[in-house]
Image (tube, helix red, strand yellow):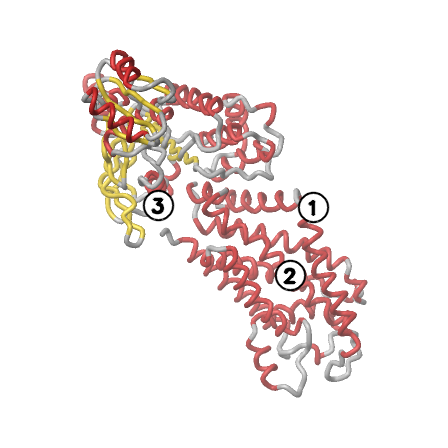
Amino acid sequence: MIGTVAALAGRDLRRFFRQPSRIVGAAAQPLILWAVLGAGLGGSFRPAGGSGVDYLHYFYPGVVVLTLLFSAIFSTISVIEDRHHGFLQAVLAAPVSRASLVLGKTLGGVAIASMQAAILLALAPLAGFHAGAMNWPLLALALPLSALGFTALGFAMAWWIDSTQGYHAVMMGALIPLWMLSGAMFPPSGDSRWIGTLMALDPMTYTVSAIRRGFHGDGLPAALVPTGGSTATDLALVGLVALVALAAAVALCRRRV
Amino acid sequence: MTATAAPSIAAAPAITPRLRAEGLTRRFKERTALDGLSFDVAPGEIFGLLGPNGAGKTTAFRLLAGLIPPDAGTLALDGRPTDGGDVRYRARLGVVFQEPSLDLKLTGRENLRLGAALYGLPRPLAAQRIDAALALMALGDRADEAAATYSGGMRRRIEIARVLLHEPSLLLLDEPGRGVDPEALRRIWDQLVALVAARGLSVIVTTHQPEEAERCHRIAILDGGRLTALGTPDELRARVAGDVIRVRGDRPEEIRDTIAARLHLTGRVLDGDVVIEAPRGHEIVPRIAELFSSGRLASLATSRPTLADVFAKLTGRGLAS
């Protein structure tokens, strides 16, 4: 089982490093979004509580989450075609459990997403974060755990939907609104109750919150966390989402039809 | 000791086939893709599933590979029943799909390593067998280049080499000729036949090409999801009486009718040719030639029946259609 998982994850990593355009694209896209949106919206950004945080600074952790999300989508979309016409057929015929196929593929995706996040961590001083003030152990835990949830969800969706167009529609149509509502783009304002409720219901809110806590370390203004809560509850929810997504992916993949 | 052992060794191949399929049936919604397919494959036998597209070959292949469960019917490998899904069954198989399944970003050797890992081979053993497989398949010098640079024939050879690393007892090949030029295909078959002879491996191969079917020990002809005939190539050819005469020209129906009226030979139009089955074809050919003005016929030839002729005789259709 471990051998299979390692072999499959290793395959995804090798493929990733042999496609330089993918490395550049995956990190550049969110950075461009960060710079453009950040510069454009910066002037009108007045977080409640007047914490004096500028928008490029605020937006950065959300961009890191978006990078994890894109990375997960990229690394699981191949599942759809590979399953019927390519490499995955050979894996399905091999005497390996479907669970190890799911784990191998998702852990490969997690490794790639984490590397892309690492590039953004290295660039964090550009957004005004000080390496010394950041909570590194929290980031080292929260980033891969979030990536695991996204990648497992991507795998489950790819297996279930079984068409690239449908997969794109669902992943973009469902996940981007969830990301927008997660506190990645704006913090909760006191005025709009319903938005606040939606944000609290959005699982991605806790992902963004955990990662934001990691970036800001102890210096995080309370007004920037949509849910209140604590690091522990954030991490527990992120872990729960990852487990549920992983279980769903394994359950879907196990069906022989 | 020897007195008790000898009969069982002699009797074993007859009693326990390598693979026994009984009544395999598979429906997709309303359509029955495979309808009660039964056959045995002996150890060391190359067994062909011959039929045109849509005959049920690929469904049979996916059932045998364990990718889909049958709606009815049973499978047994060396006497052990399986539904195709269990790991012990799949560990004994080597499966090569019709669609390319190499990772083109990886090198040939990396693809082989990955295959070995999926079948649980320890690394040192895998390395040893990979070197041997590359040598056997004459791929050694290109093994460390990306698979994307390989020709269709090389990719097929790597795919076959990959599924032989764990020394399976049954090899499944789905249309190995697809995307491979005839010369490369001939080499693949030479290697396959040598492997079967050397290791006692059994092979099931699906194909719609008579040339490939000719190289099988026995062939099952499939049409519309059903088994139409089963036998050695010679047995199947014997179902066609005598020789096969092929007449090509414009308006083949008119040519067929002229030959029927003047020579009392019944032919049929198949893939644009008039095909007549008759003994002593070499004597009939000049008589047909005399019937038509020069230039009316594009070609006229007689030959021993091929498996494509057998298929046409049994089903009334060509293999290509």
What SS does tag 1 mark? helix
Residue highlighted by disc 2: A143
The Cα–Cα distance between marks 2 and 3, rounded to whole angstroms, is 36 Å
Residue B85 is marked as 3
Q: Chain of mark 2?
A: A
Q: Chain of mark 3?
A: B
- Regarding residue B89, the answer to whether it shows in the image is no
Q: Position of residue B193 (x, y in %)?
A: 39, 21
Q: Residue at x 34, y 23 (%)?
A: B214
Q: Amino acid at mark 2?
A: Leu
The Cα–Cα distance between marks 1 and 3, rounded to whole angstroms, is 39 Å
Marks 3 and 1: in contact by CB < 8 Å? no
Viewer-closest of B55 and B256: B256
Q: Amino acid at mark 1?
A: Pro
Lateral position of residue A195 relative to residue B122, left or right: right
The Cα–Cα distance between marks 1 and 2, rounded to whole angstroms, is 23 Å
Q: Residue at x 62, y 78 (%)?
A: A227
Marks 2 and 1: in contact by CB < 8 Å? no
Q: Position of residue B97 (x, y in %)?
A: 43, 37
Q: Could you classify mark 3 by the number of other residues whose Cα lies within 10 Å: few (under 14), some (14-19), or many (20 or more)?
A: some
What SS does tag 3 mark? loop
The image quadrant that residue B35 belongs to is: top left
Q: Amino acid at mark 3?
A: Gly
Q: Residue at x 59, y 35 (%)?
A: B148
Nearer to us of marks 1 and 2 is 1
Nearer to us of marks 1 and 3 is 1
- Vertically, is A232 above or below B101? below
Q: Could you classify mark 1 by the number of other residues whose Cα lies within 10 Å: few (under 14), some (14-19), or many (20 or more)?
A: few
> Is label 1 on the same chain as label 2?
yes
Viewer-closest of B26 and B298: B298
